[in-house]
Image (spheres, coloured by chain):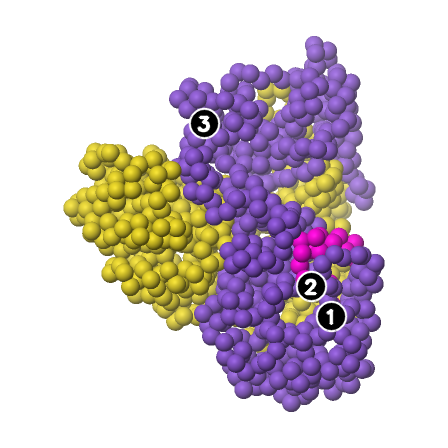
Chain colours: A purple, B yellow
Amino acid sequence: MVKLYDTTLRDGTQREGISYSTDDKLKVTERLDDLGVDYIEGGWPGSNPKDIDYFQKVQELSLKNAKITAFGSTRKPGVEVKDDANVKAIVASGVEIVTIFGKSWDLHVTDALETTLDENLAMIEDTISYLKEQGLTVFYDAEHFFDAYLNNKEYTLKTLQAAVDGGADTIILCDTNGGTLPLKLKEIIEEVKSKVDLPLGIHAHNDSDVAVANSLVALQTGVSQVQGTINGYGERCGNANLSSLIPNLKLKKGIDVVTDEQLAKLTEVSRYISEVANLNPPAHKPYVGDSAFAHKGGIHVSALMRNPETYEHLKPEIVGNSRKVLVSELSGKSNLIYKAQEFGIELDKDTEEITQVLDKIKTLEHQGYQFEGAEASFEILMKKAMGTYQKLFELEGCRIITEKTEGLTPNSEATIKVKVNNQMVHTAAEGGGPVNALDSALRKALIEFYPVLEEIHLIDYKVRVLDGNDGTAAKVRVLIESSDGHESWGTVGASTNIIEASWQALVDSIEYGIKLKGDN
Amino acid sequence: MVKLYDTTLRDGTQREGISYSTDDKLKVTERLDDLGVDYIEGGWPGSNPKDIDYFQKVQELSLKNAKITAFGSTRKPGVEVKDDANVKAIVASGVEIVTIFGKSWDLHVTDALETTLDENLAMIEDTISYLKEQGLTVFYDAEHFFDAYLNNKEYTLKTLQAAVDGGADTIILCDTNGGTLPLKLKEIIEEVKSKVDLPLGIHAHNDSDVAVANSLVALQTGVSQVQGTINGYGERCGNANLSSLIPNLKLKKGIDVVTDEQLAKLTEVSRYISEVANLNPPAHKPYVGDSAFAHKGGIHVSALMRNPETYEHLKPEIVGNSRKVLVSELSGKSNLIYKAQEFGIELDKDTEEITQVLDKIKTLEHQGYQFEGAEASFEILMKKAMGTYQKLFELEGCRIITEKTEGLTPNSEATIKVKVNNQMVHTAAEGGGPVNALDSALRKALIEFYPVLEEIHLIDYKVRVLDGNDGTAAKVRVLIESSDGHESWGTVGASTNIIEASWQALVDSIEYGIKLKGDN
């Protein structure tokens, strides 16, 4: 009976740095539908042309589970509902369900809306009853509900009564400023339940770091609709995180809000949306983060090797994630052995090799390398330390020139001289930037020897400045992810010179790819 | 009566990517003491030489509030306590308070420790009583307490009784795997309280996204010690976040865990520790995040301009943070007016200028620029749109060459030709990387005209790859932060060529700095 209401595409876009195109929004809609949410709040048709465009195009999608809803506000003060531009845009959007927010808090009515308390009540009731007359289902978002209730209980309850009188189908209690703590929230919801005879929903924000807990507590107190966003995206500290709430409800409360198959898509959907949002995937978020099941402590890893239940509250596969064992200067030999096994290398706990590899890792980490996320470089490193690695070519030298004339797009060119199979190749290529030019030149030099390079592409290139205090003289770490269309692998380089760091990661990436494809 | 127990320096270092030097740990210790925590868990003396070094040096600090504690495990199975290497290291560390963790969960005793259930009880009791005999205060961390309790209540309570019998001063209930939800946790703690007559503590992990809520609920259920880390750092999804718990307790529960002055240092301490950890400050974390009080929605900003309480659950200054108004394609004219006021520019809501600036921002954001964090570039942009900006020099052209020979550190050189005050300057410089060389050459060309450049330094240089899918041909955004030792300012550039993007940010940074110092 718990309904999932996703507002990733509306409240979620209030997060700093997020801006979706209509096409992005349509793609996200399909993924949310796959995941099994009940409602997808697509936007606010009254606020901008992009959202109007979305509501037209979304009607052409054939969704499996979800219903699309439109968001909007109550009519403006002193205007007839039917003449209100915002209300008209909602009706024109073609949805069957609308979510209308109204003011619960007397302070907002007087200070933000600048109208009277009575007019606000009329705005709520009029708007809802008008939309009901148009045949729509109406959810009423009681904005700032909890602050309002603590401030002026009597007036706040009147606003809810106005929603009831207007014919609202569900009333959503919003903790808009995110300042309410769980047990207080529980107490207030219990009071409201005894006074309002309509299904209730919860819309929580994370400003006190308890949005997920508030949502859970609300559901355990009899609320039936929960609003949130994937990855907890939203203004300031974000909205209640559906990527945490969904598995919490299904796995820990036994409420089947989604099917097992849908739950197994959770991590993928989370990462897809962060990609569309052009944000790094949230590494440490519960359930879906790349580090959510990452283990660094040597004790933990040796226990996990005996029994995974010892340090994991659930199997990562259930939510489509996977375990990750980290290798670092702090980790023990167990981590290294676990890691080597992943690469098909059998290591013995008490050999000299392990000590050598651990020492080498310590030195390189100190220099700024990081092998978390660069497992291909780690595998190469391990093989080098064991003396079993063979290079595919030798660099003699290279030169990268970038030329800029005011008003023109700058141009980068690389020349390169490498020895492959005892043959010297000297060539050159251009690129959008210096690293791209170098990458192109290296590929050009190698492709006749390793034609499989045609299938290998860089899919991600990340630069992290390690020690910001030195300004442009700082050390940089480059992480490259490559793919052959099936598998992908990460490599790393570090230097004060971005070209050197990129070169190291590029060489590992290309050599690893060629060896993987068996073309050496 | 609530005691704050900080484990940033021990459990916090289990987070992916964190590795502190002894010196880092000492500096962090002083900041935590300034913030007013009661206990600082400095490390695990039995686990590595770095921690032993820390415990020696920390004795030389004169701390104002905090007591240092050492972490360790119960003795190994079948060993006498006085001969156990780990216990000996703890005693040798010189602390007055130790925290000893032991196994609560029968599964762990048999599968991880590989010993008998009775031997585990003896290990707990022996270790604690031995440490008490050495005159130490002993906190007992009941590892995996909640999972253990649900799995085998009887045995779990026996482990607590062993701690009581050994003479423990406080028992800390640990949700080690982070799988427990708030109301279940409350229920279990209530049961334990009726059975164990010792002060209790809570140690929560965030794997279910409720660590802060669990800690709060535990405190409201009569627990008196709360363990956590600054920024919630910790293995997997992290530990309970003290940066959220401290203001929640003080501002919302009225528990004076720190003074007003200490609370005002919270944001600074959070950012300091992320800097020492070499991690980006957590932008969206409650209270301390750079975005915790960031407002993007036009409606919110116009309401905030009337009354800040409308969309903020507290004044940001109380926790040492500040409000941030974002300007983006989604933001309204109110944001722009608010922003312009910050720069001392008076804009009128209905002028043509505002529309022009908003249009320009939309175009630039679409190209990858971002003015959040680059307010100096934004101010320059605004002045350019209003026709009041004057450039300080003209670039004729520049060329950057990086040369790499296998086995040698690569070398970058830049040549530059600029017109300043109708004079042509043509010069060259070297650098650790191409951007550093360009920066040096530009400064060299300008310094005789603007000697104040001597005082202006880049303090941070960030590169973000915007569209990873294009590999090394992707678009990059460069953010530069500069300072004259008193004020700092951010600038931005974006291009597919990193040198072009860096150039744009560099020019804005230098021009802004020179104008700020009045040297033009």
Residue that appears at 53% across and 57% down: A254
- Tell me if residue B369 can be seen: no
Q: Look at the numbered discs 1 and 2 and tell me whether their residues touch, using CB distance below 8 Å.
A: yes
- Residue holding disc 3: A358
Q: B330 and A86: which one is in front?
A: A86
Could you tell whether B95 is left or right of A444 in the image? left
Q: Is residue B354 magenta?
A: no
Q: Which residue is label 1 attached to?
A: A97
Q: Chain of mark 1?
A: A
Q: Quadrant of residue B227?
A: bottom left
Three-letter code for the amino acid on which mark 2 is drawn: Tyr
Residue matched to label 2: A39
Q: Which region of the structure is painted magenta? A: A22-44
Up/down of A36 relative to A91, above or below: above
Instruction: Look at 64% across and 74% down and name the residue there.
Output: A170
Instruction: Point out residue B341 in the picture as x, y percentages from the top left corner.
Output: 65, 69
Say whether disc 3 or disc 1 marks the residue closer to the N-terminus. 1
Residue A289's x, y, as percent?
Answer: 57, 47
Count neighbours of disc 3 (C-alpha within 10 A) and say few if under 14, some if 14 to 19, many if 20 or more. many
Q: Which quarter of the figure has residue A47?
A: bottom right
Pinpoint the chain carrying mark 2: A
The one nearer the camera, A132 or A41, is A132
Q: Which disc is residue B460 wearing?
A: none
